[in-house]
Amino acid sequence: MEERIVVVDDDAMILKHANRILTEAGFRVTCLKNGRLLMDYIAMNPVDLLLLDIRMPEMDGFETICALREWESENSKEEVPVIFLTANEDSDSEAKGLSLGAMDFIRKPFSSEALKIRVRNLLDLILLQRDLHREVAKKTAELESLSLHVVHTLAKTIDAHDAYTNGHSERVASYSKEIARRYGYDEGRQEEIYMMGLLHDVGKISVSDTVINKPGRLTDEEYMQIKQHPVKGAEILTTISEMPKLVTGARWHHERYDGKGYPDGLKGEEIPEEARIIAVADAYDAMTSHRSYRDIIPQDHVKSELEKGMGTQFDEKFARIMLEMIAEDQEYTMHE
């Protein structure tokens, strides 16, 4: 496919010369006389490389590249590579051009061979960079997929440790992600909180099976063991340097909005936002799951408990989102 090159210069002879050289070299060339015409053109047409004169009336090359970069940013467009055309040997102009994002300079008047070689080399470099970025993105996606698989496996191991929490981690992760989505998190942050939710109870691995699965009332000592699982979970997840935010859900999902939670007694906005979301999802799933001493709690009762906990146990805004989800779940499908 022919690469699309735009040449912007107020000198008609330069435009004619560049057009002939680059067209003969196999490029698709568009010639424009000023920066304003370029801005109109680029809004409607893809461009692979821009050759831009510095000294032009009305809107010089520096002003043009600034306008171009602003437009690209506002419209989420990839930056067009720019080579400045200049008749000066001015090092200050060159420094300014590079600081504004130019990739190269070509001195005027230019020879046919020099122009073709500089343009071809830069386009080849850009292609190589794009191929590299695609390969990095592909490998990153593969690693993220592997990481998610490992996290899912670990979450299932955690739940298997507790006879009464089958699928608990997956449900908490899903509810947390949906609360986050409705609150306005972007997809990246939604995935982050999903991972946090999957591993929020990882510290329970350090609690003995006897205590975890005890059907009757826990002793004070046994309850203290249970209350240590957020700290233990944070200690485990701190070692995963690639995903530092995992610690947030594990350590602080039992904090309360009124400051009466554990392990750190954080209050209100001191509690990380993701942990406040997971706290609501965790409490909801606890109420809508089977336990040795009770069945799933009726939906109206669950709703009442969430309303009662707003501003004390829960951040009200996240509890309200959970209540919206309950209101939409008329068949009461959101349970174990």
Image (cartoon, helix red, strand yellow):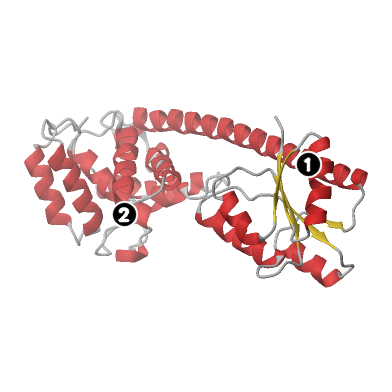
Please state the horizontal and vertical placement of residue 150, each as a whole percent of the image: 50, 30
Please state the horizontal and vertical placement of residue 199, each as a whole percent of the image: 41, 40
Q: Secondary structure at mark 1?
A: helix
In this picture, residue 182 sits left or right of residue 37 = left
Viewer-side residue, 14 vs 179: 14
Residue 183 vertical position relative to residue 127 in the rendered view, above or below: below
Q: Amino acid at mark 2?
A: Arg
Q: What residue lies at 88% left-to-right and 42% top-to-bottom?
A: 117
Name the quadrant of the N terminus. top right
In this picture, residue 77 sits left or right of residue 191 = right
Mark 1 closeness class: few <14, some 14–19, many ≥20 residues within 10 Å: few
Name the quadrant of the C terminus. top left
Query: Residue 66 sits in which quadrant?
Result: bottom right
- Regarding residue 228, the answer to whether it shows in the image is yes
Q: What residue lies at 42% left-to-right and 43% top-to-bottom?
A: 187
Viewer-side residue, 203 vs 12: 12
| Residue occupied by mark 2 | 276
Mark nearer the N terminus (2 vs 1): 1
Please state the horizontal and vertical placement of residue 265, each as a whole percent of the image: 33, 63
Query: Residue 302 sits in which quadrant?
Result: top left
| Residue occupied by mark 1 | 125
In this picture, residue 49 sits left or right of residue 182 = right
